[in-house]
Structures are given as structure tokens and as C-alpha cells.
Amino acid sequence: MVKEIEVEPVTRLEGHGGLRIVLGDDGKVKDAQFNITSTRFFEKFCEGRYCEHVPRITPRICGICPIPHHLTPTKAVEDAWGVEIPEPAYKLRQLLQNAKQYSSHLLHFYALAAPDFLLGPFADPALRNVVHVINKMPDVGAMALKMMDFGQKLCAEIGGKSVHPISAIVGGMKKPMDEDARDRFLRQVDEQIEFTKKTVDIGLKVVEDYWDVVANVGVVPTYYLGMTKNGVHDIYDGDIRIVTPEGEKIDYDVHNYLDALGEHIPEHSYATHMYYKPAGYPEGIYRANTLAMINAADKMATPLADEALKAFREKIGPISHHTFAYHWARLIETVESIELIKTLLEDPDIVSPDCKTLDVEPKEGVGVGVTEAPRGLLLYNIWSDADGICKKLNLLVATNHNIAGIEKSLMHTAKQVFEDKALEGLKLPDPWIK
Amino acid sequence: MPVLPALDIVYWPAVVDFKHDSLKARPDGDILVGFVEGSLRTNEDIENAKLMRNKCQLIISFGSCSCYGNVHGLANQWDIQKAINRKFVGAESITNESPHEPKEHMPGFTDKIVPLDEVIKVDAYISGCPPKPEAIVSAVQFLLGQKPFPMNESAFCADCILNNENCLLEHGKLCFGPITSTGCTLKCTNNGDPCVGCFGPSKSVSNRVGKLNDMITNINQLSSGDKKNLYEFLSLFLNVPLMAGFDLSGDILKQIKIKGEAKTTLTNLPSETEEISSKIMKFLRDNRDFTEISTVCDTCPRIINSNSTMTKVKRDYEGLPNMDDCLIEQGYICMGPVTKAGCGGLCMRVNAPCTGCFGQTEWVADQASRYADVAIKGFNVALSKDELLSQVKDHLGTFQKFTLASNKAYKGGE
């Protein structure tokens, strides 16, 4: 008899989706689907809007990463209109993007992922959540909350609101950072760096505890999609970088994204399947997000993060296909973000009033803006008419880059679980929280 | 976070692990309160809303998506098939030979976005995109029927890092530390901001209470921003629910207007605390300007009737406004005067105009026309109504960005 296993909905996920695994009579996995059941057509209803209003609409795509959805369309419009921004605005945006990276990565690590590892995969679903972790590990919980709070506060300070920011405008930023506020954050940043180091220690301990899982479950060779600036890890600005399953790196100017990135419309998901065009579908399915960024980078932008990258590569090698290594990769990026936050807070440019190009003029043109959001590459391709009205918009959204990759690793892991019974011999640690 | 341990969360996919089946399996009306968020774009969204209605005794329409349809309602401008085609057929990056809308295990789309209360009965609304955390905490506290924080012995000043020569009160800033309970994380004063009284009264007052009482006695000398915030202080302090659009029991201003004072369940307050709060209540009762907190402008720190005048409508990318004068008077379309209060005027504080995410103060068919009337009447605008409106090219996206789906007069579907 054919058996269908449904997980509806997938929880601790920022969106709406379910999993469906179909097993045949012979116990073989016939199908594995990741069904995303929601989409809202931002591509369509941004048509007819003022181009400069698009960055005030699109943050609503995601309540977790509204900042990249504010900055990326702003960059796309600037590209379409040929607008340059002053250096202080560039740095303020970098700071804003990294503040978001910091709080989002910590939210992911502590609130979305940690319950699985700290309570173990067989814990009571009623308890397997962040509230329980905070109750049981109050010291770690207090630290985690302080870290997320720091990042969110910094987002709110520069962005105006931490969720759905408003301070970027075509031509720069609406306002520099206040000196008082800058000093306040500077006073806290060293403590945050210490917290980050402690978090990395917790992460490495989890990796060690679960090494059998990391090394053996969901190790799926795919392509990877990342962004680098001259080969260096960068989340605000750079070129698209594809990494092949063998580890070869290929760079594309963002304007040529259609040469690299193809979108396959599946029958069973509103989130589409992205793949590396020259390799074809489904062979070219890639993954994005932290592991992809780590695989793509020649080096990290800051010293501590670069050391962390070297440690990662010593353990895993120059390219990692380990799905469970995403968490480790996320921590390496977290280290980079807090180091960059400190450097940028120390930079006098961020309080400079020269934060906006004053003579901005719309013109007919096509623009592409790209940043790396916490869940993957984010790309806006906008068509402006001579009055600066948005005629058309194509979006390749961060999470969407991972859907095909998630389904591919789901299939792989389902086979491991149901066909090879790979979980039976797996070594699991005693849960930290019992 | 402080209220979470008091709650028994039975369904919250983003945070806890209960699945859909566990919600379906509950008896009808089993859950005290359900917060329903998000716009209703798919048939599954509609089914889930109905399911929540059946399982919950109270439904709160949470956020501007469920209250008004939010920006997604702008899609009502077109026949839904055009939106489907743009995404699943026409997108430049698509490579299928004959791409089409996914159908397998997919719920399908509704023709139009509608607000939640057109699909199910709604008991209370909390608007905003996003809603203010204070509104969420207030709502939950109200529903819990108690203040989750204890009324501690000592006042906030005892723990405050500024309790020295840096004391904000000593520098002429209005801070409610002397009468507010300890127990919070001190985030306000740690950030250099004054205590807003959100932890409620303490059992005893600090020795700086005289300074605070002096300021309140000379209440007319407070800055207009401080005056505008008095009602927010009182609401937080006395644990009276406050929020734009949270209409479960009416906010403090209505209570003051109708009964002359706000009702609080708190008793045995220190006499100094009683004195300060009754002075504030009297002030609010006697000064209509500060009890008429209804639009975003009422909480915006900028000067109205400033030295600036709108002589043409500027787009947001043009120039850079100054931080002091009203943005409308500096030439920008700011939705503040027609938008419900509740946000605290956050956008204007970083030099960006309001776009109306808390929803409109009045529902009329022609929102653009109403905006022009309000702007020309209340602000330095040297344009006729026709001039103002003809200089805005995108009326729907400018005047009804968050609420188009709630405008029953709008037909759309081109």
C-alpha cells in the first residue's frame, strides 16, 4: 500500500508550507515534496507605483528580513536611474544590513534551531520551543535576548523601525545616525562581541555532540548561490557567485543574472524552483543562505570571522554539502556581522550629514539590485519609465532560492531514513535539557 | 517576552511545534483568544480563518493585513488571473516551456483581497504594520485580566544608572522614574530615554518625586511632545488598555472624557503618585488638544504652521527635508493627518513621511479627495485641491496603500 506522510504545517518556519513524502509498497521513497502554499504577487501590485515607493511596500514580503527588502529595491531604482549615493549613506546601509544579519542569525540559532538540538529530536512538541529553552537555561536565554535586542535596536535606530524600515531613499539615507545613539551602541558593542564568542562556543559544542548527524545525514551535493565582493564575503554589495558541487567558483555581474539563474515553475509549490541555468533543471538545483555564502567566500571580511572560516574548512574541507553545517556557517557570518558593526560604529561617516544625494532625477531604465538577506541572495530587477513609475518588477527572493534545494535534501534524507534506516545506528548525545 | 510564561500557547506555527491537526482536533470554542494575522490571499487562508473562529472565543484581527488587507490589497486593481500570469508565466527568469499556475496540493487564490471581518466575525482590532509591541502586551495583559508585573516596594530610580548627576529630571526632562515600580530591564534609561511608567506604580516613591511633581504642577510649560505623550504614560501606568484600533473596552481618553477620570484597578497608591496622576488627568480633561489624540500628527514631534509652505508636491527622493518642520509643509505627501494614531510617529522621526499603515481615520469612497481637503485646511499648503491631486500620479499607491481592500466603493479588476 502506498503511504503518504504529511507534515502540515512545517513549524518554526517563517512562512506557510508543508512536507509530503510518498512511500511505495516496497518501502521505497516515491516522492518528496515541499509545498509552499502562499504567495502574494508583489511583482504585480508594485506596477504603477512610484519607484521610490517600492522600497516602502516590499519590506512586507518578510517580517524577519524587511531590511534587505528595503535596501535592495532602493539599490535597484538607483541602478535604473543612474544615481550615486554618498559614502556615509553606503556605510549606514552596510551597518543596517549587518545589524539585521546579526539579530536574524541569532533569532534563527536560538529560537528556531536550538530547541531541536538542546532538547533533542524526540522531545515533546509542546516543550520543543524557545520559551522552554529560556526557562530551562536562563543564563543562555538572557544572553540570547540581549543579543537579539541589540541587533533589533540598532535596526530601529538607523531604519526608523526595526520591522519595515523607512530610512533609505533613492539617493542615500533620510538621516545620519545621531551621535548620542552611536555612542550608546558603541558602549555595548564589546559585550556583544563577547556574547558572540560564547555563542560560537555553544554552537561548536552542539556540532561536536551531533557530529554523527552533521557528517552523515542530509549530505547532499548541490550547486550554491552566494555573493562576494572581489571574492570576499559581503552581504550588502558584490557579484553573484555560483559554486559547483565540485567547488569551482563562477562570478556573474548582477546585471547578467538571467545567464546564471533560472526559475522552474513546479506543479506543487507556489515558491518556484531555482537552478543554475547552464547546468539545466533539475541537475543545476542550488542552495543559498549561510552554507552557500561560506562555500562561495574566498575569505571573510573581518579577522575573527576569517579565523572561524579557516576552522570550519579544516574540519569539513573547502566545500561543504552538509545540510546540518548551515548552523555552523550561520555562526561564522554572525561573527563577521558583529565585527563589522563595531568597525562601522567607529567610523565618523555614519554621523555625517552628507547622507543623501540631493539632485536625484528619474529616468527611463532597467535596474538590478542585489544584497544577501539572512536567508539567501535577494534580487530586485525593476523597470522604470521616464517619470519614475515602476512598469515591471521581477523578484528573486531569498528563501525562494532554497526551495528546490530543500526538496532535494528532503528526498535524499527521506531515502536515508526510510530505505537505508540510517537513523537507527546514529549516535545522538544526551539532551542538554531533559 | 514577559507575558509569555503566563500563556498556554496552543497553536503558533512560527514558534511552537503543534501541527494543524492538533488545532482541528480541539472542541469548538476551546481556545480563549486567537490572534489572526496576514492577508487572505488563498482559499486555505479563508479556511484557516474560519477554523480559528470556530475554535476561539475571541478573535483579534491582528495587524494591518487582517484589519485592512495591507499592501496586498493593491492587487485588487487587476483581475487575479493577471497577477497569476505575471508570477507563474511572465516572469523573466522562468524557463519552463509552458509554465502555468501550480495546482497539485495547492489551495488556489481568492479573486480579491478582503479584510478578515468580511470573512468571519471579529471581536477586536489591533492595526499597524507592524503593530506596536506595546499594543500586543496591553492586549494580552488586558485579556489575562491582571498586571503581570508586581507592584514593587521601591521606585525605578533605585535601579536607574542615571541616578546621579545625569538624572534626566535634573536636566529638565520628564521622567516618571520616581513613582514607577522597579523590576524592568531599565532599557529606557540605559538608552538615555526617560522612564515612561510602563511597569506601573511602586509602593513607595523616590526622593526625586518632588522634581517630577514640580514639572507636572507646571504642566503647561512642558514641551508639546511631552504633553502629547501624557496620555500614553497614564494608560501604561494605570494599566488601562491603550491602542489605536483596539476597541475592546475603549481607551483612556474616552474614559477621561466621559467620566472625568480613568478607572484603575490599582489601590493604595502613595499620595504623591495619586497627586501626580490626578494632575495629569485634570490636564488631559481640560485641554481638548491633548485628549483629541486621534491621528498620527497628534504624536508627531514636527511643527505645524511652520516657516515652510507646500508650493508643489515633491516626490520622496527630492532634496532632503529638515527635521523640524511638518513634512507636508515642506512639500511631501505625508499621510499623518488622515491616519490613525498608535505608532508614535516613528517614520517622521527619521525624516520619512507617513504612508498610512495604521489605517484611515475615516472611511470615505474617495480617499485622495479627503486627503487633499484635510491637508489644505490644516497645513501651510499654497496649492488648490486640483493642483495637489494632479501632481500625484499614483493615487491608489499614495492614498490607499494599506487599505484599498477595505474600500467597498472600489471596484478594480481591470
Image (cartoon, grey):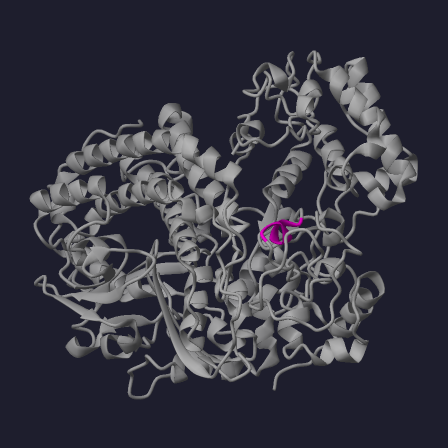
- Report the quarter where the N terminus of chain A lies: bottom left
Instruction: Provide residue B12's location: percent of width, then percent of height.
Output: 48, 47
- In percent of width and height, residue A431 lies at 25, 30
**Left or right of B15, for residue A229:** left
**Residue toward you, B189 or A134:** B189
Q: Which residue corresponds to the image point at 17% horizontal and 53% vertical from the top-left?
A: A218
Q: Is residue A231 visible?
A: yes
What's the residue at 61%, 24% (across, down)?
B149
Is the residue B395 above or below the residue B176 in the image? Answer: below
In-image side of A259 versus B329 (left or right) = left
Q: Is residue B279 above or below residue A289?
A: above
On whether residue B161 falls in the magenta region, the answer is no
Say whether residue B347 is magenta. yes
Question: Does A245 sit above or below residue A303?
Answer: below
- Residue B290 percent across, percent down from the top left: 83, 42
From the top left corner, tell me how far across and down residue B358 is, in percent: 67, 56
**Residue found 68% across the figure and 51% down from its top:** B324
Q: Nearer the viewer, residue A214 or A416?
A: A214
Horizontal placement of B372 versus B197: left or right? Answer: right
Q: Which residues are magenta?
A: B345-350
- Main SS, magenta region, reads helix
